[in-house]
Each structure stands twice: as structure tokens, then as C-alpha cells.
Amino acid sequence: MSESLVLSSQSGAVRTLTLNRPAALNSFTTGLHGQLMEALDAAADDAQVRCLVLTGASRGFCAGQDLADPAVAPDPVPGAAPKDLGDVIERHYRPLVLRLRSMPVPVVAAVNGVAAGAGANLALACDLVLAARSASFIQAFAKIGLVPDTAGTWLLPRLVGRAQALGLALLGDKLPAADAERIGLIWRCVDDAVLQDEAQALAQRLAAMPVKALVATRRALDAAQSMDLEQALTEEVRLQRKLGASHDYLEGVAAFMAKRPPQFTDR
């Protein structure tokens, strides 16, 4: 039986996926990539899942790429051809980010420790990021002669602006979770002792909301980054026309008029 590099648990309509390479701070290997994609696909296909939480085992969230993994480790033989890192990105990190951004449910990152390199941008690719106060975010790429990947070049300036994005990417300094919240890189920083409880409470809240509308909101905000005002307004027309015909809209209005809690079921 293969090692479980991603642990999965369910609480009501919330599924939690835990990266499980604690001895290596949950850094990525080819095996971890494969199991994480399988777990994300399974959650996407399960109608009982209405929100997803992504976290790490033990004291780290994800330290990025494991540089000892054969897929990226330089060949010690003199004169050997260099590893094709672009191929690694194309085969693993690109589909991972696209899978996260196309999930049919909201995704919460519960960053319980260091999130470095691809691990930092994995968290930032989620919809809402909660981080423990002891956690930190490090864009470590420049320190080994690379550029931010795992959508870092797209995410960072959109989250914090060009000046902050360049500072984080060029210097590669450790950014404490409290500072990450202050500059708008993440949603919220909380005390370590309550991180997982806060993440579960947030996920349960999202799971009880109109999930189809939440996902449409994510997609609309992402798409609007490359639109002008008129195009964004046109997209809003299209989305409201579609969502206005949904069960959840009718239920939401009926519940509001009757002054009762709504029961949303669309996904």
C-alpha cells in the first residue's frame, strides 16, 4: 500500500485535505502532487462536499518543492543535462493551480506553519487564507535563481500591488502572518491554538451559503482582472441572469420574505 501523502477527513459538508509529509515540512514531490490532485478531483466530484479546507500536518503548511526529489534535483554527474524545470511546472504546478481555481466549491487554506515558495502560492491560490500567528510566507525563488511559480507572478501583484509583490519576490524575506494580513496578502491571522477551529467554522459557514453563487463570484473577480468596465458589466448581466434562475436564488428570497433561515442546495 502506498504512503498516504494527503489525508482526507469529512465533517458535515466540509472536507479537509491535509498535506502529510511532516518530516519534510510537507514539501512537494511527484507522489504528493499525484495524491493531492486525486484528492481535489474526488472532492470536486462529490456532491456532498460544499467547502474544502487545505492544511498541513504538524508544524508546517508546505515548504514548496522538495529539492531532493529526483524530478528537480540536479544530476551529480559532470556534464549531465540540466533538469527541465519547465516540464515539472507544466506537468504538476500548472494543473494544480488550475484545479484549485476551478473547484466547484469554496476553498479555505489553513496555514499552520511555514508556507514557502510553491507552498506559499498554493495557499494564496485558495479562496480564503487563514494563517496561524506563528506562520510565515516566503517567496524563496530568487534565492535559488528562479522566478515565482505556482501562479505567484499572477497572484502577488493582484493581492498586494506591484511594489509589495516585487519586494516579496526579489528579496525572498520571511513575512510573518500578521504582516501578511496587514498588507492584504491573506484574509486573516489568528492565534495558533484556534487556527483549525476557526478554519472549520469558516468552512462550515461557507458550506451553508449558496455555493454556486460563491464560486461564480470567484470566477467573476478573476475574469474581471483582464476586462474593462463595460466587459465586466456584461459579465455581471450574464451571471445574474443564470443565477437568478437557480433554486438558491428562489430559496434565498423566499427565506428572506418569510424571515426564516435559508436552505441552500445548489452546487
Image (cartoon, rainbow, N blue to C red):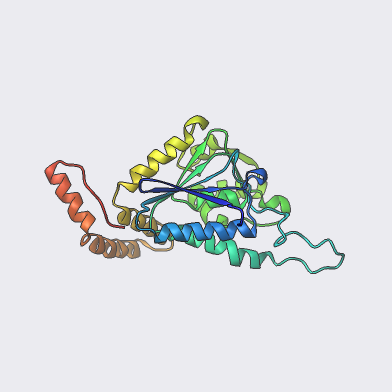
Q: Position of residue 99 (x, y in %)?
A: 48, 61
| Picture residue at 34% right of the left edge, 42% below the top | 205
- Residue 189 in sight in this render: no
Residue placed most toward the observer, 198 or 215: 198
Q: Position of residue 155 (x, y in %)?
A: 52, 54
* Residue 259 vertical placement versus 240 (above, below): above
Left or right of 262, for residue 164: right
Q: Position of residue 157 (x, y in %)?
A: 52, 52
Residue placed most toward the observer, 79 or 162: 79
Picture quadrant where residue 112 is located: top right
Left or right of 175, for residue 234: left
* Residue 225 vertical placement versus 171 (above, below): below
Quick one: which residue is furthest to the right in this view? 78
| Picture residue at 70% right of the left edge, 62% below the top | 71
- Residue 130 in sight in this render: yes
* Residue 149 vertical placement versus 26 (above, below): below
Number of marks in picture: 0
Q: Position of residue 261 (x, y in %)?
A: 20, 42
| Picture residue at 63% right of the left edge, 54% below the top | 28
Residue placed most toward the observer, 181 or 19: 19
Quick one: which residue is furthest to the front in this view? 1
* Residue 195 vertical placement versus 19 (above, below): above
- Quadrant where the image shows the C terminus: bottom left
- Quadrant where the image shows the N terminus: bottom right
